Image (cartoon, grey):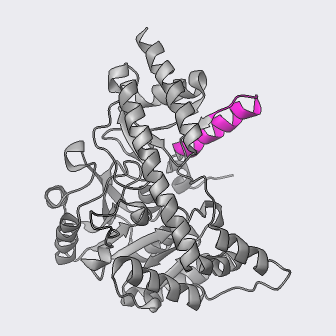
Amino acid sequence: MKISARAQAIAPFYAMEFGKRAAGLELQGHHVVKLSIGEPDFGAPPPVLKLMREIMDGRAMPYTASLGLPALRQSIAQFYRDQHGVEVDPARVVVTAGASAALVLLMAALVDTDDEVMIGDPSYPCNRQIAESFGARVNLVPAPAETRYQLDVQAVQSNWTESTCGIMIATPSNPTGTSVALNELASICEFARDAGAWRIVDEIYLNLSDHDDRGAAPRSALSVDPDCIVVNSFSKYFGMTGWRLGWCIVPEALVPAIERLAQNYFLCPSSPAQHAALACFTPEALAVCEHRRIEFGRRRVRVVNGLKEIGLPIPVEPNGAFYVYFDVSHTGLTAWEFCERALDEAHVALTPGTDFGVHSAKTHVRLSYAAPMSELDEGLARLGKFVTSLAA
């Protein structure tokens, strides 16, 4: 059987690979503290579960429109108005089978072979893998600790080429949990727009960002660039990882192309998941999600302080999502070696920087604190003993 060059070129998602290894250890009877996967432990909010149970009563669940249930698209638009003060036409909202499907549709719509796409390093690996699958040449631009592991306008301008057709930014970022300041994001988007390039802003973790001193939620990129494309998901803030439901908001002119692609690639997102997701936007569900956001903040404090006590430095503390990106270079191990040995010897699953680019791949490790506090305490205790053993 001939395997395509595309399939052979794509790299594994190492976070999932370490998750598989952790599952193997658990089958052997070991308790593994799993801090490698960005999966909230809470699950879907109770109103969503209740609605799903009501829906799954044996009734027919036909295909929805390829762009999603009209009521869900309306609810998402309302969410942006209520939470972020942005007016969005529901006709620009595209419901997808997870944020990954949104990225597939967008790359199919926007990228031709040998188009150059700029992405910061470190960054979520699937973004560049999907872009490359559609023929893009990804320009991974180093985003150091000095700029909070995020691109700034100076880096964008310095690395822009005649072939650059678009830029992808995640704020807050996976793996670092750090955000781009809104004024910096506005400058980046303005530069790219003036160059005739598209802008995709990954806002999957936006609603898990810290609120400001007045208690205001963070603003969407749409507030400074109405024609940018934003990608979001029900997986993180709403805790619905396995439900595979996300969305993107696109310029009006892009909707017809996205609709044709969605019709052919996916037909539609999961019908029952869409119907149940309507309950996400009820006051009860939103209150639950806000309580969980605050809980993630408490977990972050525990993890940041715990890693510091162990002697694992965090060059830039996160302000959103549920990740900490820490430096292991002083241990004498590469990030990959650190994660392998932490799993094998301490039974703590982490993710090496290898997943997220090349700039800090050998020196940094991602820890996900989307796990119960008891597991975080146990994981930190085990890591403390492990790091001490390295120095012995």
Q: Is residue 190 left or right of residue 269?
A: left
Q: Which residues are magenta?
A: 14-32
Residue extending farthest to the top is 392
Instruction: Spot the residue most to the right.
Output: 58
Q: Is residue 340 above or below residue 174?
A: above
Q: Quadrant of residue 189?
A: bottom left
- Vertical side of 61 occupied by 191: above or below: above
Residue 360: image x %, image y %?
32, 38
Main SS, magenta region, reads helix
* Percent x, y of residue 304: 38, 39
Q: Is residue 235 shown left or right of residue 221?
A: right
**In percent of the image, x 52 and y 26: which residue is there?**
381
On the image, the x and y values in percent for residue 204 come to 44, 64
Q: Residue at x 33, y 26 (%)?
A: 329
Query: Is 7 colored magenta in this rendering?
Result: no
Q: Nearer the viewer, residue 130 or 281?
A: 281
Looking at the rendering, in which quadrant would you find the C terminus? top left
| Number of numbered discs visible in the structure rendering | 0
User: In the picture shown, does residue 347 fall above or below 81?
Assistant: above
Residue 17 shown in magenta: yes
Task: Look at the image and tell me whether residue 200 can be seen.
Answer: yes
Q: Is residue 107 visible?
A: no
Residue in the image at 78% along x and 79% along y: 54
* 266 sits left or right of 327 in the view: right
Q: Position of residue 372 (x, y in %)?
A: 58, 45
Answer with the quarter of the image where residue 154 lies. Answer: bottom left
